[in-house]
Amino acid sequence: MTSLVIVDLTPLDKVQLAQYSEQAAVIVAEFGGQFIAKGEIEVLHGDATHSKKAVIQFPDKATAKSWYHSAAYQAIIPLREQGMQSQFHLV
């Protein structure tokens, strides 16, 4: 079954975030993932802790977990941490 990784984020450093995003997109594609939505959020109900969201679709949960735990993705996490505050959710 298709699975989604939902990323809530607040940018901290636009340059670092751009570098991270460029590298992350390549790694996501290597695992058969694709971004299906990203950008500013509009809150319809409740409180939002982050101003942006990205939704990444993977073929299944196992593939999404393999992507997240891969050596290639783990190597760019320090860049992610400099570029944004975030939460990642797997559905």
Image: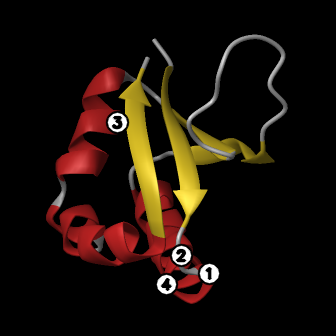
Kindly identify which residue carries mark 3: 64
Q: Nearer the viewer, mark 2 or mark 3?
A: 2
Q: Residues within 10 Å of mark 1 (few under 14, many from 20)?
A: few
31 above or below 73?
Answer: above
Q: Are discs 4 and 3 less than 8 Å apart at CB?
A: no
Q: Is residue 55 above or below residue 62?
A: below
Which type of secondary structure does the marked residue at label 2 adopt? helix
Location of mark 2 (residue) = 17
Q: Residue 14 shows which numbered tag?
A: 1
Q: What's the CA distance linking mark 2 and mark 4?
A: 4 Å
**Distance between mark 1 and mark 4 Cα atoms:** 6 Å
Amino acid type of the residue tagged 2 in the rendering: Leu
Identify the residue at image location x=39%, y=38%: 88
* Mark 2 in CB contact with mark 1 (< 8 angstroms): yes
Q: Amino acid at mark 1?
A: Lys
In what quadrant of the picture does the C terminus appear? Answer: top left
* Residue underneath mark 4: 16
Instruction: Name the foreground residue: 6 vs 61.
Output: 6
First in sequence, mark 1 or 3: give its number.
Answer: 1
Helix, strand or loop at label 1? It is helix
Question: Which amino acid, by three-letter code, is at mark 3?
Answer: Ala
Nearer to us of marks 1 and 3 is 1
Discs 1, 4 touching: Cβ within 8 Å: yes
